[in-house]
Image (cartoon, rainbow, N blue to C red):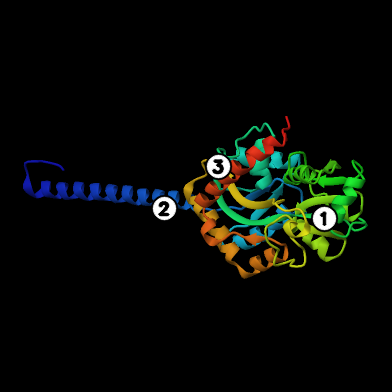
Amino acid sequence: MLWTKHSGRDSVCVTRARGHAATVSSAAAFAATLASLGGAATQIYPSRPITMIVPFSVGGPGDTLTRIMAEHMRASLGQPIIIDNVGGAAGRIGTGRIARAAPDGYTLGYGSFSTHVVNGAAYALNYDVLKDFEPVSLIAHAPQMIVARQTMPANDLKELIGWLKANPDKASQGTTGVGATSHLAGILFQRQTSTRFQFVPYRGTAMPDLVAGNIDLMIDQSSNALPQVRTDTIKAYALAGKSRLAAAPDIPTVDEAGLPGFHISNWYAFWAPKTTPKDAIVKLNTATVEALADSTVRRRFADLGLEIFPRDQQSPDALAAFHRAEIERWWPIIKAAGIKVE
């Protein structure tokens, strides 16, 4: 404010000074508001497509599951999800890429019993399966299924075990890699049945070679085996679960078929890189939960032999607790079996 001795003219000067200050103040406030709005706009998530890394090849059960989920998560997120298949090394390559991705909410990772439990005990990893990921949600689970080529002479599980005993080291089991769930299942099967056969590791699914008769058997995810069982291109002997699948009620459990206690199931979940912002985790979880509640998703999962986890187990905290419990249960078993790959 200006101060002079002459009252009339001085008052005009004072008024003009005050008006100038108000104008400057209003301009500054307007600029601050624009900056604030601009900052808010840049914080809207997601503002671009999200990449979902699947650490297995195209066409496998993990790939199928994630594509179903991605299709229905788009509505909640308002952005497409791009599937990036990074196969090889029993899922270790792709899982490592998830762990090293920028924690900005734009990388979502598919994981399973194989990638986040078995691999942690069987391999020297360059990431930590517990510490390097943010849990998003459990999705579904499926017991393993004991299947064989269509020309296998055995008609039931007891006959299959008998045939393997009569032909030691002659049969071959396809796996998704040394230390993978299918490999672990094969080792446990050999120990429990006193049989011997060769393991043939694949970068992805071995199912095409089983259908072609190039390998003899698989202990595979029911979601992967069931479509081939339905088309009668392979034989199914038993489900490695405690109860029959609603989608395949004619396939007996291992307890019913003569191999009691041989229970091994694969489960599937979503993780993000460690330190991914909380608001992004919440949105990714919400999109996952809404997709799992969709009737089309539920029907397609049921057709694949997948059972969706209950709603109260679909939170990030529930996945974290479940993951820890699975490690506490299985790591001692895996290590006792001597499955360790350098």
Evaluate whether residue 281 shows in this view.
no
Report the residue that reaches farthest toward the bottom. 295
Kindly identify which numbered label has been placed on residue 37: 2
N-terminal-most mark, 2 or 1:
2
Q: Residue at x 64, y 38 (%)?
A: 332
Residue 342 picture quarter: top right
Residue closer to the observer: 306 or 132: 306
Residue 217 x %, y % = 85, 51
Residue that numbered label 1 is attached to: 147
Dot 3: within a 10 Å radius of its alpha carbon, few (fewer than 14), some, or many (20 or more) residues? some
Dot 1: within a 10 Å radius of its alpha carbon, few (fewer than 14), some, or many (20 or more) residues? many
Residue 113 x %, y % = 66, 47
Dot 2: within a 10 Å radius of its alpha carbon, few (fewer than 14), some, or many (20 or more) residues? few
Residue that numbered label 3 is attached to: 103
Evaluate whether residue 30 shows in this view.
yes
N-terminal-most mark, 3 or 2:
2
Residue 68 x %, y % = 68, 60
**Element marked by disc 1:** strand
The residues tagged by marks 2 and 1 sit, at their Cα atoms, a distance apart of: 59 Å
Residue closer to the observer: 184 or 82: 184
Query: Label 3 is placed on what type of residue?
Result: Pro
The residues tagged by marks 3 and 2 sit, at their Cα atoms, a distance apart of: 24 Å
N-terminal-most mark, 3 or 1:
3
Residue closer to the observer: 126 or 32: 126
Kindly identify which numbered label has been placed on residue 340: none
Q: Is residue 69 left or right of residue 238?
A: left
Looking at the picture, does residue 253 appear above or below residue 195?
Answer: below
Marks 1 and 2: in contact by CB < 8 Å? no
